Structure formats: structure tokens, C-alpha cells
Image (cartoon, helix red, strand yellow):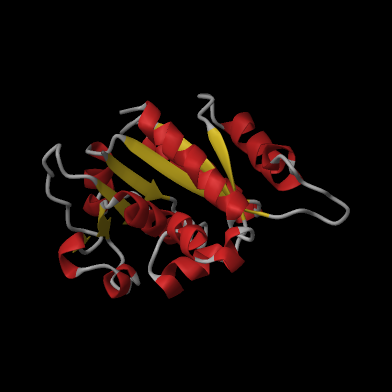
Amino acid sequence: MKITVYSSKGSAGKTPISANMAFDRGYALGTNEPFNVLEDIFDDDQVISIAADDAFPELPSEIDIVFDLAGSISRHAHSITSAIKQSDLVIVPVYNDFKSRKSAIGTILEIEPLTKSILIVATKLQAQKGEFVKDWKKSKDYQQIERDIRANVETPYPILPLKLSKGFDTIFDREMSLRRITETDPLLAHSFRDVTRQFDAIYDHIDSIK
């Protein structure tokens, strides 16, 4: 399985999503960011790091990898196009901010000529004042993201929720996945329970396209 996690807008959660997946599933990692944290927490032989204008090698089908990509598609951004073209799925993270929503829409439209296998992940979801959230798809943050994307993107790509959580920092502090953290630390098991289940839903989607 080859997966690209990509958005032209920063701070949407690309690297935490990529790292969590790599820890959980033993994937290799590909990145085009010159100063990245992945090389600090994963073994050297697990990370492929290239410049944005270089192309990732065409990898054999038996290699599982998640590409964590920054930047925007252009005729010089060979790293992005080479990753997307060989990926089984592209995950586009987006949070409820005008610039992030606009960027996500632009990202989806620019990658559609390369692939129609797209999953949108609504990240950094928070309960607004006076809002009690049990189903995060019913949260105001999620619904605003969904409205904007449905109004501007013709294909009804799936959108999965991923709430804001301190667990994303803990992934890097502990150098393990959220699932592993909840299994080994009873104090954090409850705090990270919901976001861990949301990742399980992402994995279920990945497994459905194998």
C-alpha cells in the first residue's frame, strides 16, 4: 500500500497523520521537506528524504510507504507528482480555517487529474462554545468543512473526522502510535480514546481499497 498525505496548506496535520500510520503499520516514510522531524524519530533506513524538485523512485508493489508532502504542485514539483502517481490513496487534511478550506479545495482539484482515490480528513476539530459533541461529523467545525468542499468539488469524496488532541504531540514525544500509547499508558488511554478510534476509521477506509 502506498499513501500520500498532502495539502498545499501547512499546519493541517500531515506529519502527525503520516507518523501515526507509519508507527501503526510499519510503513516506510517519504518526505520532501528539508527540515523534517521524521528522520529524528524513525530509523534512517525507514525514511526516504528528497528535494521538492526531485522525483521519488518508482517503488516495488511490495513496499508499503506513506509520503508526507509539503509544497504545491508545479512543473518543478516532481516529488509531489511522482508520489501521487504511484499512490493507492491520497489523504488531504483540512481544518476549519478559511485559508485551510480554500487550500484543501485547490489541492483536491489539482490532484484530480492524477488520481480519483482521495480521502479528505477534517482535522483539528473542536467543540465550539455551548456545543457538546458526541458524533464529530455533527460538529460545527466538521460541517463547515463539509459544506465548503461539497460546494466546490463535484466528486463526493469521503470526509472523515479527526479531533484536535494533545495526542499528536505525544506521538513524537513517545515515538509510538496513539494506539500503542493507549495500550501502554492507562492515564492517557481515556484522553486519546476518541482520536484513536477516528484513526481506526481511516485505517478501515484504507483497507477497503486494497
Quarter of the image where one finds residue 22? bottom left
- How many badges with numbers are in the image? 0
Task: Please state which of residues 120 and 74 is positioned toward the viewer in this rendering.
Answer: 120
Q: Visible in this render: residue 82?
A: yes
Question: In this picture, is 195 found above or below 32?
Answer: above
Query: At 64% from the left edge and 36% from the top edge, which residue is drawn?
Result: 146
Query: At 21% from the left edge and 59% from the top edge, which residue is drawn?
Result: 53
Task: Please state which of residues 101 and 22 is positioned toward the viewer in this rendering.
Answer: 22
Question: In this picture, is 155 found above or below 166?
Answer: above
Query: At 50% from the left edge and 24% from the top edge, which residue is drawn?
Result: 155
Question: In this picture, is 139 found above or below 130?
Answer: above
Task: Please state which of residues 84 and 194 is positioned toward the viewer in this rendering.
Answer: 194
- Residue 121: x and y in percent read 52, 44
Q: Visible in this render: residue 76?
A: no
Answer with left or right where residue 92 lies relative to residue 148. left
Residue at the top extreme, as displayed: 155
Q: Quadrant of the C terminus?
A: top left
- Residue 79: x and y in percent read 24, 53
Answer with left or right where residue 187 lies relative to residue 155. right
Q: Quadrant of the N terminus?
A: top left
Task: Please state which of residues 18 and 107 is positioned toward the viewer in this rendering.
Answer: 18
Answer with left or right where residue 147 lies relative to residue 44. right
- Residue 192: x and y in percent read 59, 58
